Amino acid sequence: MNSTARIYRIASIPGDGIGREVIDAGLQVLRTVSELSNGEIAFEVTEFPWSSHYYLEHGHYVPEGGLEQLAEHDAIYFGAVGGPEVPDHVSLWGLRLAITQPFDQWANIRPVSFLPGVSSPLRKADTTELEWVVVRENSEGEYAGFGGRNLSGRGPGNEVAVQTSLHTEKGCERIIRFAFDLARTRPVTKVSSVTKSNAQQYGMVLWDEVFTRVAKDYPDVETESVLVDAMSAKFVLHPEQLSVVVASNLHADILSDLGSALAGSLGIAASANLNPDRRYPSMFEPVHGSAPDIVGQGIANPIGAVASAALMLEHLGEPAAARAVLAAIDATTGAGILPKDLGGVATTAQVTEALVSALREDQ
Ligand code: ATP
Ligand code: MG
């Protein structure tokens, strides 16, 4: 490390299941990035052991003072949370949302990237030309956590549950503006807004109105408003028409899984939970979960976690390093080194080794 090194403090939270396997792979790639930078880039990684195992032992995921510790870092590198021993909503609210909410990570960026050598279920002539980004409202909407159970009090068999969506004008506006600003940095300057405003007449109509208003500030950007059911079909039938897709928390969550499945597997999808105001650290994580069905077998696909590390490099202000990592992914899949979920036989370790070699060869 030389005295002018740019040093980044990374909080790593491998979490549950294959989280550890894929985060280890990502950290190995980051170490290589640092090594090849001639001492210009350095990472100080602190690991936090918060997981479902930790929860069962301590009764909480994030201990007291934990968020303050995280806040001292430049970015958070997250694996996955969830496992057979803890109900999904408890683990999600206990760890992932316990970070994204207080750190105001209101923009969730999920690129849909088609890789060379990976076949897509889309019957398109050339999927390598396809690439779009799902921008997910990450702070309110259907995941605001409002509602309750047993409101009727009428006893067993008659329970009523209410789950309320919260859409604020400010919340809609900031994510929609974010999507327009992102579109301006891309080859195709287009934003597709997704709602279900025919059936949901309050929040989704507010979203549509804000979208129309904000669009006036971006006359150079093409726009469309599409219902979520129609957008699901469009992902499959006309993905070449997509560039930036902006949607509510729930809709974008579903659409981004659809996008990654079209691109070949959930295992390659990357995600950034951004606090665009940069008051708090942002968090980078693969889209996939803890995958308890394949944990410990050494076959987890590390590409989603490694591509998330590329998003982290970009956010930290290291775009050249980010591009090098993405190029290493392309070189690896292009050479036919594919893990099981992409139809290959390469182990997590072999894919990681190939990514590291590709980075070195790119030097
Ligand atoms: P969670 O409750 O944490 O969301 P899950 O099993 O419900 O876990 P995922 O972990 O997203 O959901 O997994 C869905 C499916 O995709 C599983 O069959 C899993 O094995 C597979 N999968 C997910 N991620 C990967 C990966 N990185 N490599 C290989 N297969 C994966
Ligand atoms: Mg799941």
Image (cartoon, grey):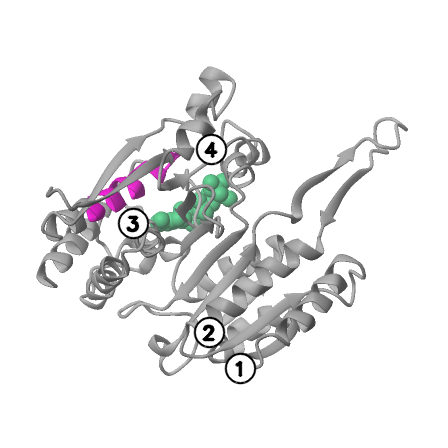
Is residue 347 among what the camera can see? yes
Q: Residue at x 78, y 33 (%)?
A: 149
Q: Residue at x 60, y 53 (%)?
A: 249
Per the rendered image, the range of residues in magenta is 15-30
- Between circles 4 and 3, the one closer to the viewer is 3
The type of residue carrying mark 2 is Arg
Q: Which residue is mark 2?
A: 184
Disc 4 versus disc 1: distance between alpha carbons?
46 Å
Q: Is residue 28 magenta?
A: yes
The answer to whether the residues at label 4 and label 3 have Cβ atoms under 8 Å apart is no
- Check disc 3: other Cα within 10 Å, few if <14, some if 14-19, many if 20+: many
Any atom of ligand 1 within 8 Å of the CB at mark 4?
yes
Label 2 sits on a secondary structure element that is helix
Any atom of ligand 1 within 8 Å of the CB at mark 3?
yes
Disc 4 versus disc 3: distance between alpha carbons?
19 Å
Any atom of ligand 1 within 8 Å of the CB at mark 2?
no
Mark number, residue 83? 4
Q: Which residue is mark 3?
A: 302
Q: Residue 174 at x, y = what percent?
A: 59, 58
Sequence-earlier tag: 2 or 4? 4
Along the viewing direction, whichever of 193 and 260 lies nearer the viewer: 193
Q: Which residue is mark 1?
A: 220
